[in-house]
Image: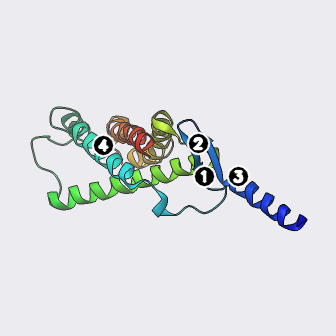
């Protein structure tokens, strides 16, 4: 009898540690810190929405009325002449794939933060995560590529500016939905 009571008590303790009461969400399940995360646990609607926001941000950033002409002139090229030898389908397809990979990586990092803290990151935390990854990884890693490639700071600032803004907004959306 005492053994059964002890086992029942341990089961309740495990259940209590696996769940956490949050305002508005009673007894929401929380994975134990350190347990593996699977891609199926991601909020794919948040990832998809973040991808759309990131891609649209990039399209606006490099639009003909925004930074595209300044970027091309900074590279020493004529904005009126078409560039690239890969064809627009390949350019846009690979750009979309790269954006999806970046937003997926951002969503995974935000999920790890949520797991470690036991609380959702929310839109502000998502935006901050996107901003930090944008500056700390994207901007910092591409600086040497641009400088050694002879493109200079202006080309770098225009390119990574769009990435940082895009990741910040994508993080906001992933944090809001996810």
Residue sitting at 58 percent across and 42 percent down? Answer: 119
Q: Which residue is mark 4?
A: 53
Residue sitting at 60 percent across and 52 percent down? Answer: 30
Query: SS at mark 3?
Result: helix
Query: Of callouts 4 and 2, which one flags the residue occurring earlier in the amino acid sequence?
Result: 4
Residue 119 is marked as 2
Residue 105 position (above or below residue 119): below
In-image side of 96 versus 38 (left or right): left
* Mark 3 neighbour density, 10 Å: few (under 14) some (14–19) many (20 or more): few
Query: SS at mark 4?
Result: helix
Image quarter of residue 9: bottom right
In space, the residues marked 3 and 2 are separated at their CA atoms by 14 Å
Image quarter of residue 118: top right
Q: Nearer the viewer, residue 145 or 171?
A: 171
Residue 17 is marked as 3
* Mark 2 neighbour density, 10 Å: few (under 14) some (14–19) many (20 or more): few
Residue 60 image offset from top left, x and y in percent: 22, 37
Query: Of callouts 3 and 2, which one flags the residue occurring earlier in the amino acid sequence?
Result: 3
Image quarter of residue 134: top left
Residue 86 visible, this angle:
no
Query: SS at mark 2?
Result: loop
Which one is closest to the eye, mark 1 or mark 4? 1
Q: Nearer the viewer, residue 155 or 116?
A: 116
Which one is closest to the eye, mark 4 or mark 3? 3
Q: Which residue is mark 1?
A: 30
Say whether marks 4 and 2 touch (CB < 8 Å). Answer: no
């Amino acid at each position: 009898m005492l053994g059964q009571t002890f086992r029942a008590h341990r089961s309740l303790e495990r259940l209590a540690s696996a769940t956490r009461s949050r305002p508005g969400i009673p007894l929401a399940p929380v994975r134990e810190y350190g347990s593996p995360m699977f891609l199926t646990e991601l909020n794919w609607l948040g990832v998809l929405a973040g991808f759309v926001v990131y891609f649209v941000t990039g399209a606006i950033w490099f639009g003909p009325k925004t930074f595209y002409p300044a970027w091309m002139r900074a590279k020493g090229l004529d904005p009126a002449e078409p560039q690239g030898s890969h064809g627009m389908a390949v350019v846009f397809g690979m750009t979309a794939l790269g954006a999806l990979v970046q937003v997926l990586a951002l969503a995974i990092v935000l999920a790890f933060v949520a797991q470690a803290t036991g609380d959702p990151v929310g839109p502000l935390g998502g935006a901050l995560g996107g901003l930090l990854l944008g500056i700390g990884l994207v901007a910092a890693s591409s600086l040497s590529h641009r400088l050694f490639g002879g493109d200079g700071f202006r080309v770098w600032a225009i390119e990574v500016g769009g990435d940082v803004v895009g990741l910040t907004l994508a993080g906001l959306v992933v944090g809001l939905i996810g």
